[in-house]
Image: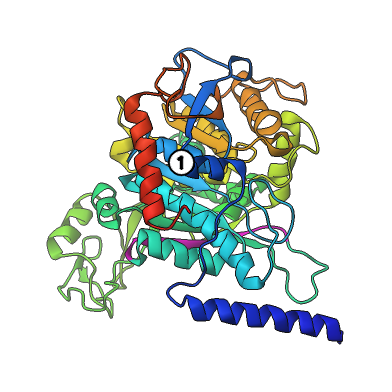
Amino acid sequence: MPTKDALLHDLAMLRAENEALKKDRSTFFQRKAEHDDAYLRLVDGQVPVFTKNEKLSLTKANEPPIVLVEGDNLPALVAFQDHYFEAADVIYIDPPYNTGKDVYTYSDSYKSRLDKHSKWASFMERRLFLARELLQETGVIMCAIGIEEHSRLKLLMDALFGEENFIANITWSGSSINNARFVSTSSDYMLIYAKNIDAVKLASVKWRTRKHGAEQLLEIAETIWVEVGHDSQKATKNLRRFYTSDEAKEIFQIEPGLKMYNAIDNEGRLYRASDLSSPSGHGGTYQIINPHTQTVVSIPKRGWVHSIETFQEKIDADQILWNGEGVPSFKRYLKDNLSVVLKDVIQKDRDLANKLLAKQIGRNKFSYPKDHNTLAEWIEYVVPQHRKDDKEQPPLIMDFFAGSGSTAHAVAQLNSLDQGNRACVLVTTNEAGISREVAAKRIKALISGEWADEKFHAPLRGSLSYYETEFVPPVRGTRKFLKALIPVTARYIKQIQKTVEDMKDGHLLF
């Protein structure tokens, strides 16, 4: 039973929230000022500048750029409005979840429940408002979040990006919590929004990724085909025997649908039997003759999925599997179906990424980083093909809650796999040494191959440029910093001042 003092405390909080809501019913939170140094300097009119730290950089010629900015992300996002305006293809962020625990870049202290959520929502609103302007028209933002602020973040992003630009709510499920009182709350979430959903639809007809294990299965089928001397019956028999092996079971555990591709035809092509009936239930009802028996075959109850002309083309190409007078099926070749749509549930043990980071930079440096393999898959998934092929201005990926640098790891891995030139811009503070001792150290380990575990690791592609944030009065800012991320010119100062004034006018800064 709650004590009298506890009940009185809760009552006082509820009364305070009720009074606050009476004053402002226009939104689901009250805007709150920030009291850290960076916020106050921006409001005061000082200009953020970024100077390169050569000692913390690791420059590699002809390698894709990885930019790591040390400092508060609010002034960084203000400064980026000119330099990176409508430049980013993907923004991935993993902001503080407002759990009540100590976190980097954000204070969880509050006076009431409404104050707690308002403080966090205000903090996020400023940054998301600026982030939207950095996205290309075909750009996408992916924002990780816990259950504590999931509902408010959804409302906030609906307001800033538009409900019509909402794409998905991904559930990221980790290991279960066996000692939970009621339910194991082991899931985080990832909200995905387009800047302009119509532009994304025009640029990418559909989002697809490669089926895990499909290429491996094609190689195995080809090996079997050669070993049996191009005999389709023997090849199919050996293939199905392989499907009972541990190696095959590992493939099917991740992508179960691949197990259906269990036959090899006379041309050595791996295929599965697929339905010829119309999914709509209103397909064609024309007659088809089995060329081997010269009999009319049964028509599916839902009708044929193809026109009679397309059906004849499949007959001529030997793509039909006949079943006497029964309904035939057709050969669906794996080589023509290598892509798959990603699901809205990610099953990934968080401890795996934790162990990997320990190997890269040492133990007890950072807790529970995001899994870089999953980030790489989603980053590759959402970038339109025409942007991937752009040689002059390759895709740009940004992360202004960079943490341990998982996003940089994901980008470097993608560039190493396909020799791409994706650029990556990260921002994080150096609280508890997170920028220098975690993110920078990790990126250096990745692109040099020199991990903390002292084993050989093939270097990933990338060239690290490390920048520090400082503030200068506008009168001093007219000089150019020789090794600045953004040249500090009169135009730059005006852009900073305009962005700050716009935010003040919109009551985002006060």
Depth check, front residue: 229 or 480: 480
Instruction: Tell whether 510 sits left or right of 85.
Output: right
Q: Which residues are magenta?
A: 164-175
Residue 463 seen from this side:
no
In percent of the image, x 65 and y 21: which residue is there?
Answer: 449
In percent of the image, x 64 and y 51: which residue is there?
Answer: 106
x and y percentages locating residue 494 in the rendered image? 34, 34
Q: Quadrant of the N terminus?
A: bottom right
According to the image, label 1 marks what residue?
77
- Based on the picture, tell me whether residue 166 belongs to the magenta stretch: yes
Residue 257 against residue 499 in the figure, above or below: below
- Based on the picture, tell me whether residue 161 belongs to the magenta stretch: no
Type of secondary structure dominating the magenta stretch:
strand
Instruction: Tell whether 147 sits left or right of 190.
Output: right
Mark 1 Cα within 10 Å, few/some/many (few <14, many 20+)?
many
Depth check, front residue: 111 or 411: 111
| Quarter assignment of residue 116 | bottom right
